[in-house]
Each structure stands twice: as C-alpha cells, then as structure tokens.
Image (cartoon, rainbow, N blue to C red):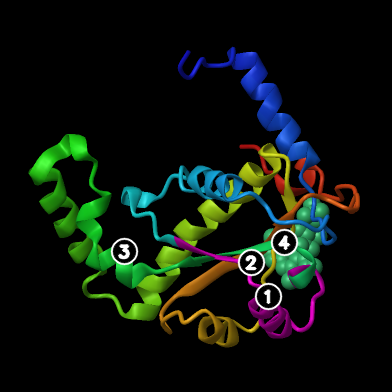
Amino acid sequence: MTNVALPETDQAQAITDIIESRRSIRRFESGPIPEADLREMLRLAGLAPSAWNAQTWRFVVVQDPALKEQLQAAAYGQPQVTNAPAVIVVYSDMEDTLQTAEDTAHPGMGEAGRSQQRQTFDGAFGAQDVAQRGQWGLAQANIAFGFLMLAVRGLGYDGVPMLGFDPAKVRELLDLPEHVQFAGIYPVGKRAEEGFSHHRHSVDRVTTWK
Ligand SMILES: Cc1cc2nc3c(=O)[nH]c(=O)nc-3n(C[C@H](O)[C@H](O)[C@H](O)COP(=O)(O)O)c2cc1C
C-alpha cells in the first residue's frame, strides 16, 4: 500500500492538534534521537514554500556534547542547549542560493526553466549587496523554521525556538561564512516537562476587519 491519504477532516484535526500542543519545552529526556526521525524533521521543514522556490534555508544538526557545551556558552548559558539530545540550527545562505539558483527550478520546466531561474535571481539580487539580499533570504528561512517546529511536534518531539545567542560566535563554532543569517536554533527531544500554557493576544486585539 502506498501513501494512502487521510480523509480531509482527519488531516485538519491532526494539524490543529499539532499547533495546539506545541509549546516551548526546555527540559528533555536523555537518549539520542534516531537519525531517521531527525531526517524526517528536516525533510518536512524543507517542504515549506519560499518565493521563487528559493529554499534559502540550511541546517546544522549538533549532537556532539562538547560542541553543544560551546553552543550553550554562545547562548549566554541557556541550559536547554545541552539538555536537549540535538540542537537544530536553522540559517539562511543567500549566497549559496544565488550561486546555485538553477537547482531550484522545477525539473518539469526543463532547461528553459533552469535558465529562467538564473535570470530571475540575477535580475532580482545581482545588484543588491550581500546584507540586503541576506535579509530576503532570512525571511524565507523563517518560514522553514515555522514548519520545522510543527514537524517536530507532529513526530512526537518538542523543542524551544531560540534567538538568544551571539550569532558571530555561533558562525565561528559551526564554521559558517559571515554572510549567513540565523532563523534560530532549536534544541529538540522528547519532552520532560509540560511547559507553559499558551498566553496570546485575542484575535480581535491583533486583527482589523475591513
Ligand atoms: C524567534 C524566537 C526566539 C526565541 N528565543 C528564545 C530564547 O533565546 N530562549 C528561550 O528560552 N526562549 C526563546 N523563545 C521562546 C519564546 O519565549 C516562546 O516561544 C514564547 O514565550 C511563547 O511560548 P510558547 O512557545 O510556549 O508558545 C523564542 C521564540 C522565538 C519564536
């Protein structure tokens, strides 16, 4: 049997449950996450949409205890970094995206699609400086970060999104070039605490209807 689709109502229920049950978790059970699960988290995150299908996101999966300790120091000592069995670093590499633009053309579009993609990217970003197009790339990577959080929950894991770290130090620790921008780091594992219940603005507080 291959890929039997759930009825639409069950799918809606599943995503609703995932969104409702996701909350920031900062304490995790010990023990490694199977690589197949980590790969599936990243595959699902990569199904995020992006403008021109640019897929600017890149990931580093940190499981090495010594490297996690260093990451924790770069994150001002926040304990969830070493408490989690894995830390997924989500960043945007717009320079790599630009250099390999053809790879993001849909194969169904053939050679014409590849050269069109090249023209599109050169036209849109060729005249921009690295910082300017880096901002655009980060906006795309943030979408994948959101998908990652839901994918992690959907696979029965939890995590806490983090931007509380020194980006220059994290670049250095992970041997990343200076132009990359971080969507965030994401310590993940099986939850060992319940976290806080949701506290959010009401729909009316943040919405104008016209
Ligand atoms: C972009 C981003 C950065 C965050 N950075 C940190 C962080 O550095 N440390 C931390 O403990 N929580 C961090 N958080 C978690 C937020 O505090 C948390 O998402 C928020 O309070 C809502 O709670 P919830 O995730 O449980 O719904 C961050 C969340 C986001 C989305």
Judging by the rendered image, the residue that carries numbered circle 1 is: 68
Identity, as a three-letter code, of the amino acid under mark 2: Gln
Percent of width and height locating residue 85: 72, 61
Q: Do the residues bearing badges 1 and 3 touch, measured as CB atoms within 8 Å?
A: no
Judging by the rendered image, the residue that carries numbered circle 2 is: 63
Q: Is residue 81 above or below residue 22?
A: below
Q: Is residue 47 left or right of residue 123?
A: right
Judging by the rendered image, the residue that carries numbered circle 3 is: 97
Measure the C-alpha gap from mark 1 to mark 3.
27 Å
197 or 89: nearer the viewer:
89
Percent of width and height locating residue 207: 70, 44
Name the image quarter holding residue 70: bottom right
Dot 3: element: helix
* Upstream in sequence: badge 1 or badge 4: 1
Measure the C-alpha gap from mark 1 to mark 2.
7 Å
Identity, as a three-letter code, of the amino acid under mark 4: Pro
Dot 1: element: helix
Q: Do the residues bearing badges 1 and 2 touch, measured as CB atoms within 8 Å?
A: yes
Judging by the rendered image, the residue that carries numbered circle 4 is: 85
Percent of width and height locating residue 107: 20, 39
